[in-house]
Image (cartoon, helix red, strand yellow):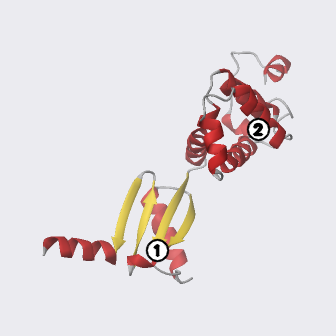
Amino acid sequence: MFQTVNQSKASPSENFDIAQLTSPETKKGFLPNIYILGEELSLLRSTIVSSENLKDFFKNPTYPESLKLEFLVSLFPGTSLLLKSFLKVLTERSHLSLLPEIYDEYNRFLLAFQKSTQVKIITPSILQESYGVSLLKTLKSLTSSTEVTLNLSYNPKLLGGLILEYNSSSIDASILKEFSLFFNEV
């Protein structure tokens, strides 16, 4: 990371265009590709949260941070220089255990940059294909996004309807909720 800063010929007074981050013409080693960094952070997050033992290892303050860093670098030897530098900074500050939360925030910023939204839909059964186009159009207007990524899950206890979750908001339009409200009134 520090080597690339020294190689830069840009003066501090020059304006920086955010499109340079994703441009294929970007010089290798000068500016990182924000999507590759996101993928690397995603792999680290998935690895840590997929195992209770790894979660405990990273949250345990009795293990030295240098050991945790050594483990990550040996597990992912092909990570970018930028990510390795970032992991070193986290190690120095004893914050490697925060990698899952860091990825979540990074992903949130990346989605905002792309004008994209992740929407979680919980349904009692498989959605019919005919609902797809109108559902996506409605979700794009509801979330004011140009792109919507759907994470679909099933819960047969809902009986009917669906639950939408996006940007820390939840819309419960399920029959289970209606039954719960009805029985609470009785």
Counting from the top left corner in percent of width and height, residue 7 is at: 85, 20
Amino acid type at circle 2 is Leu
SS at mark 2 in the image: helix
Q: Quadrant of residue 77?
A: top right
Q: Is residue 116 above or below residue 79?
A: below
> Which numbered disc, 2 or 1, marks the residue closer to the eye?
2
Taking the spot 81% from the left edge, 36% from the top edge, the residue there is 73
Amino acid type at circle 1 is Asn
Q: Give whichever of discs 2 and 1 has the lower sequence position.
A: 2
Counting from the top left corner in percent of width and height, residue 141 is at: 45, 62
Q: Which of the pair 62/156 is nearer the observer?
A: 62
Q: Which residue is mark 1?
A: 155
Q: On the rendered image, what quadrant is the N terminus found in? A: top right
Is residue 185 shown left or right of residue 101?
left
The mark found on residue 72 in the picture is: 2
Q: Taking the image as drawn, is residue 69 in sight?
A: yes
- Residue occupying the far left of the picture: 186
